[in-house]
Image: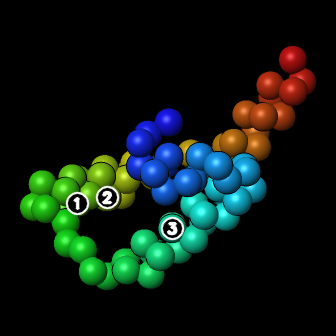
């Protein structure tokens, strides 16, 4: 366990209270959503991933269902 967890007393919290703390921390970070900027590298990587996703439509739901049914019949 990290020294910060011990110095803040987080190590003494039970599991449920630690989960609640994590949720509160995450909510506080999400509330600041618009206050950060991406580096040019991060922005380029997101653009690359979006373009890759757009170029590959993936598998349709009908294909997934057909494959699952075919596999279940074996």
Which residue extends farthest left? 40
Judge whether 23 appears above or below 19 on screen: below
- Label placed on residue 50: 2
Residue drawn at 80 percent across, 25 percent down: 71
Q: Nearer the viewer, residue 24 or 38?
A: 24
Earlier in the chain: of badge 3 and badge 1, it is 3
Picture coordinates of residue 72 (x, y %)? 87, 27
Element type where label 2 sits in the image: helix
Distance Cα–Cα, label 1 vs label 2: 5 Å
Residue that mark 3 sits on: 25
Chain-order first, disc 2 or disc 3 = 3
Which residue sits furthest top? 74
Disc 1: CA contacts within 10 A as few (<14), some (14-19) or many (>=20): few
Q: Which mark is residue 47?
A: 1
Element carrying mark 3 = helix
Is 51 or 44 nearer to us in this picture?
44
């Amino acid at each position: 366990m990290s020294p910060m967890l011990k110095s803040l007393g987080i190590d003494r919290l039970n599991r449920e209270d630690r989960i609640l703390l994590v949720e509160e921390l995450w909510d506080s970070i999400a509330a600041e959503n618009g206050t950060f900027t991406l580096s040019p590298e991060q922005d380029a990587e997101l653009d690359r991933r979006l373009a890759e996703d757009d170029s590959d439509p993936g598998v349709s739901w009908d294909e997934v269902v057909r494959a699952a049914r075919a596999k279940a019949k074996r």
